[in-house]
């Protein structure tokens, strides 16, 4: 058998030189007349090892990483040895892929196929249990599918953690000729890339999940609202939709079921607020992304006023897994009311950043220390921001909190979309608090005054505090401003921007010049 | 200008019946012309049966839609938290200084327009920048300079630059 040499074609791997590496590797394999061929796979999500080169033979699948162009010759020597049955001696050799600690310690359900092969190869997807969930869904009634999702305990992975089954039930129960499935792929939170990884490495899973949702609630049209910052995911989704349509998994009469489901990708235009579901719907309708007041719920009056399921990429992906493996098996993972797995994204100043899919309940410390192995800079970790730009900054005293929606809510923090950004001890938390307000200035849709104007005032007040201008009174003012934003904004943009600000003030007050001489 | 307007008119015809077609149209115009000329607002409004104010409102809401021509290459620096934790603020000031422009401006030779971006989804290997449709990871000052120097020929194909 010709050995397959896999080099990922995923945004992060390519950003680290994977395209050039693949080209050179193919040339060198040819010039050496090696019995091997280069293939492009998705990424496993072990981004600190990218570009990671995997070699698959009949008996094994081994990896090297991170591989640079200058390592090609020596890696090919090692592959040569391996193919000749000799043992491998190379500093970048990682052993069997599946046994790499970082991957072996995970519970991969949603990301089980990521990086295994060519993301848009349909037969590969089907060979790895793809479209089995859809086949089951086709044999079920809408209510039976919704019951499976309800029983699984799946909650929205976008951030709000609303029970997906209840949302689907509402759409199913709302009468209407036309209903829609909308996938929120506007993954704007800093420190998050799970949606992108799934779309780039296993796009058919999202397509399958959306089709299942369509069958469940009686919708024949789906839209993936994708952020424009993901040009490669855009291309791959369009390719995958085309192939799935040609193969009869999308379009009219899917899989001879008599049911239709059409799917289209729509591109956002660089507005963070469009990740908020009602703003996203406005944008999909071709309008300014202004947040809508709820009620009416999108499930009742959503896209173009029709009943609409709006779910995150990972929620819809999980739906495919749940249908395939059964809701009881999915429910077995997790803790409390957080069932299944969470795609943790470890990012920022971290040594081993990447995608870590784990059952709910692991602590933040276990992730950052056990998987991340400390900071990239080698300095001590000072603060961790979980849940994107609206998430709190957490000091070490909070790192033993288990990853569970309720446990995080108790400490006024949030899991959100699962992004973890690590900061070392050089971070200036007052500057980060200021940035949180500044970001809100740039990204507020402008509908609610506390958000639109409060954020601008917030930047000014923080500047005065740091500049020691009437500090005590400005601190009172900042807290009052945060109260106003939290209580007077329609959505999480204005309502939660105070979270990072207040947590920075509470845990890192010395950075604001407060009690700077006090020993900590 | 006429050729441009003809092109835009064709695009309006193509997108006006698409549900929620205004954003796809604006992307298409931007793709074709590099920007959305103010002069097209009237015909877009007519084609979509909207007021000029509504069309202007949509264009001005989104960061992606510029109404003035931009440089040959669009360079975006990620300002989001993960990149900040890895020193993107220094890249940001270095970029502004070395190019001699602020965000939203274009170099005098028309080569580069510098823009901020809030997350490229490449947060495990920060700091990140985007040049046109290519994303680069672990960018430091010298890597930034190297990438900019490679832009001297229009639309130079991305070359192998692993170090």
Image (tube, helix red, strand yellow):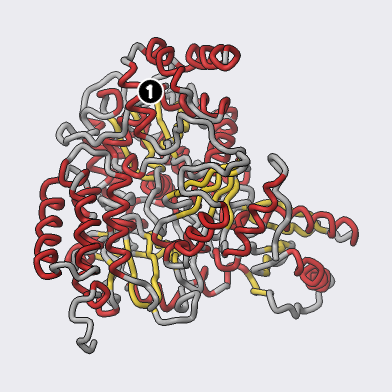
The residue drawn where x is 60% and y is 55% is: A15
Give the number of callouts: 1
- Which quadrant would residue B74 be assigned to in this image? top right
Is A129 on the left-hand or right-hand side of A422? right
Outermost residue on the bottom side: it is A519
Query: In this figure, which residue is indicated by the disc labeled 1?
Result: B20
Q: Quadrant of the C terminus of chain A?
A: bottom left
Q: Horizontal and vertical percent for residue A244?
A: 55, 33
Q: Is residue A155 visible?
A: no
Relative to A435, residue A382 above or below:
below
Q: Horizontal and vertical percent for residue A396?
A: 29, 79
Q: Horizontal and vertical percent for residue A161?
A: 26, 52
Q: Horizontal and vertical percent for residue A275?
A: 34, 43
For the residue pair A326 and A299, the one nearer the viewer reads as A299
For the residue pair A338 and A427, the one nearer the viewer reads as A427
- Which quadrant would residue A504 be assigned to in this image? bottom left
Q: Quadrant of the N terminus of chain A?
A: bottom right
The residue drawn where x is 47% and y is 33% is: A265
Helix, strand or loop status at disc 1: loop
Relative to A360, residue A250 above or below:
above
Relative to B21, residue A155 above or below:
below
For the residue pair A290 and A400, the one nearer the viewer reads as A290
Name the chain letter of the residue that bears numbered label 1. B
The residue drawn where x is 39% and y is 76% is: A426
């Amino acid at each position: 058998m010709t050995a397959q040499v896999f080099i990922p074609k995923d945004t992060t791997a390519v950003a680290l030189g994977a395209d050039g590496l693949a080209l050179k590797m193919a040339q060198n394999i040819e010039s050496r007349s090696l019995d091997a061929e280069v293939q492009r796979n998705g990424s496993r999500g072990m981004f600190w090892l990218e570009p990671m080169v995997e070699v698959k033979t009949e008996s094994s699948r081994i990896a090297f990483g991170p591989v640079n162009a200058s390592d090609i010759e020596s890696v090919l020597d090692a592959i040569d040895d391996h193919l000749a049955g000799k043992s491998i001696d190379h500093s970048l050799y990682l052993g069997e892929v599946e046994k790499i600690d970082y991957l072996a310690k995970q519970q991969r359900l949603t990301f089980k196929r990521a990086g295994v092969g060519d993301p848009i190869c349909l037969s590969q997807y089907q060979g790895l249990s793809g479209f089995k969930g859809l086949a089951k869904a086709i044999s079920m009634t809408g209510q039976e599918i919704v019951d499976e999702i309800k029983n699984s305990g799946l909650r929205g992975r976008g951030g709000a953690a609303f029970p997906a089954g209840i949302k689907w039930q509402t759409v199913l129960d709302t009468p209407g000729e036309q209903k829609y499935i909308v996938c929120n792929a506007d993954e704007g939170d800093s420190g998050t890339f799970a949606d992108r990884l799934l779309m780039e490495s296993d796009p058919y899973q999202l397509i399958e999940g959306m089709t299942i949702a369509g069958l469940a609630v009686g919708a024949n049209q789906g839209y993936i609202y994708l952020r424009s910052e993901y040009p490669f995911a855009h291309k791959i989704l369009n390719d995958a939709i085309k192939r799935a349509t040609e193969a009869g998994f999308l379009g009219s009469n899917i899989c001879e079921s008599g049911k239709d489901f059409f799917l289209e990708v729509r591109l956002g235009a660089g507005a963070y607020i469009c990740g908020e579901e009602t703003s996203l719907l406005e944008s999909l309708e071709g309008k300014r992304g202004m947040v809508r007041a709820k009620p009416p719920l999108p499930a009742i009056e959503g896209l173009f006023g029709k009943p609409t399921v709006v779910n995150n990429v990972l929620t819809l992906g999980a739906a495919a897994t749940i249908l395939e493996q059964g809701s009881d098996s999915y429910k077995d993972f997790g803790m409390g009311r957080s069932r299944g797995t969470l795609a943790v994204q470890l990012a920022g100043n971290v040594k081993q950043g990447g995608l870590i899919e784990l059952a709910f309940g692991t602590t933040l410390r276990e992730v950052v220390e056990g998987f991340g192995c400390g900071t990239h800079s080698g300095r001590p970790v000072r603060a961790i921001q979980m849940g994107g730009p609206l998430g709190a900054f957490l000091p070490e005293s909070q790192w033993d909190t288990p990853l569970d929606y309720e446990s995080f809510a108790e400490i006024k923090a949030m899991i959100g979309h699962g992004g973890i950004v690590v900061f070392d001890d050089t971070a200036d938390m007052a500057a980060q608090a200021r940035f949180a307000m500044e970001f809100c200035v740039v990204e507020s849709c402008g509908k609610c005054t506390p958000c639109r104007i409060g954020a601008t005032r917030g930047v000014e007040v923080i500047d005065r505090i740091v500049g020691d201008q009437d500090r005590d009174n400005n601190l009172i003012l900042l807290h009052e401003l945060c109260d106003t934003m939290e209580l007077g904004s329609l959505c999480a943009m204005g309502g939660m921007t105070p979270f990072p600000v207040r947590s920075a003030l509470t845990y890192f007050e010395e950075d604001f010049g407060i009690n700077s001489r006090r020993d900590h | 200008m006429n050729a441009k307007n003809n092109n835009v008119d064709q695009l309006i015809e193509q997108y006006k019946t698409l549900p929620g077609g205004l954003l796809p149209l604006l992307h298409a115009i931007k793709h074709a012309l590099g920007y959305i000329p103010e002069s097209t607002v009237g015909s877009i409004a007519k084609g979509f049966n909207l007021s000029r104010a509504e069309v202007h409102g949509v264009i001005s809401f989104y960061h992606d839609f510029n109404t003035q021509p931009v440089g040959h290459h669009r360079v975006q620096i990620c300002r989001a938290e993960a990149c900040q934790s890895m020193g993107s603020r220094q890249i940001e000031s270095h970029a502004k200084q070395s190019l001699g422009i602020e965000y939203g401006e274009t170099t005098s030779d028309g080569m580069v327009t510098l823009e901020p971006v809030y997350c490229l989804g490449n947060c495990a290997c920060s700091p990140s920048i985007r040049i046109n449709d290519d994303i680069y990871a672990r960018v430091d000052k010298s890597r930034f300079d190297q990438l900019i120097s490679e832009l001297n020929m229009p639309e130079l194909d991305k070359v192998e630059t692993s170090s």
